[in-house]
Image: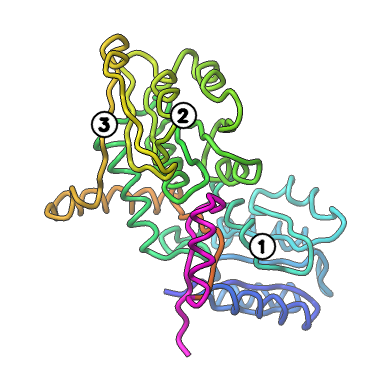
Amino acid sequence: MSQKILVIDESLVATKLTENVLAQNFHGVDVLLAQRGNDAFDRFNVAQPDLILLNESLPDMDAETVCYRLLNDPATSKVPVVLLASNGNGDRIEERYENVIKVLPKPVTPESLLEVENATLSKNKPMVNPARQLLFHDPSRTVFSGHTAFFSLRLRGGLEEGETVLVHGGAGGVGTAALQVAKALGARTIAVVSSDPKAVVARAAGADEVVRSDGPWKDEVRELSGGGVDLVLDPVGGDRFTDSLRSLRESGRIVVVGFTGGSIPEVKVNRLLLNNTAVIGAGWGGFVLSKPDLNREIGAAVNRFVQEGFVRPVVGERFPLERASEALEVIDNRLATGKVVLDVREH
């Protein structure tokens, strides 16, 4: 089912520009246009959109009035509103109305629309029907990342409510999914990232705390967790693995899901003995391939998290299929945030 986005703007040129940005960059989106506030409410009652892009000024009512009416109508109160404003004029409205999830500058760009999804994650404001997702959702991303995260954290790592989990690669596809699933399981989350932009992505995905991999992250993690974390999820491997062991509290465990850092670490097992810690492998694909009942169990859990608004895949850069080599370079150079997507368009 396609996503429905209602664009409310008095300028026909502006609404058409926004419509073009959506059509050119995102699949499965139906764009509805309205140039007056009252027209918008009529369109809403008929189409029931999943998201509203609202210009700060309309000919028949101001944006604050629109937000107020939407928030106080049970049929529309849970629909996210993105306010299009200039010179910081929308900040006051965003603070006052909880249905306003983001203020964007005009005109709308693909980059600013990515901020919209991150805002829904950070404010935990799901769609009217969260299973339909927001703009960027492809079920395959939930399967590979969400299922891997649940399998690794809950089934292999035994993560329990109230525990603290450290996630390496916290801005990547598996990392962001792990942060979301961990929050759904009631855990406290700490993400390790390599840059400030990635820190923003990790926080939006659910990280309670973020530390930098180029800093004294091990010491910071032990301080933030009061002596060590209960579980480390590691899709990176490499040189940081020993410090991951040192980040654990007694009876803690590391769950290994990959080696994107390039090298496979070795474990001195005396560390496991002395601190009563464990290293656990989590190879989701090979393990569940011949276990349909387990696959259904994982799928049901992840779908529940989607319905509850916890899990929504984070999508980073998008490339047309003919630029697949550039997408691989982004991944190889560790510049990716969320899932890197190749668009296969029908001509």
List x then y, in percent, for residue 168.
Answer: 46, 36
Tag 1 near tag 2, CB within 8 Å: no
Q: Nearer the viewer, residue 40 or 238?
A: 238
Amino acid type at circle 1 is Glu
List x then y, in percent, for residue 271.
Answer: 32, 15
For mark 1, what is the residue? 111
Question: Which mark, by number, is residue 280?
Answer: 3
Q: In this orientation, does residue 291 appear?
A: yes
Residue 9 shown left or right of residue 343 in the figure: right
Question: Which mark, by number, is residue 188?
Answer: 2
Amino acid type at circle 2 is Arg
Circle 1 or circle 2, nearest the eye: 1
Q: In this orientation, does residue 28 appear?
A: no
Image position of 312 with respect to 155: above or below: below
Amino acid type at circle 3 is Ile
Circle 2 or circle 3, nearest the eye: 3
Coloring scheme used: rainbow
User: Element at badge 1?
Assistant: helix
List x then y, in percent, for residue 127.
Answer: 51, 58
Residue 79 shown left or right of residue 307 in the figure: right
Span highlighted in magenta in the image: 321-347
Quadrant holding the N terminus: bottom left
Residue 26 shown left or right of residue 235 in the figure: right
Residue at image point 26% right, 36% down: 281
User: Neighbour class for label 3 at 10 Å: few (<14), some, many (≥20)?
Assistant: some
Image position of 200 with respect to 130: above or below: above
User: Neighbour class for label 2 at 10 Å: few (<14), some, many (≥20)?
Assistant: many
**N-terminal label among 3 and 1:** 1
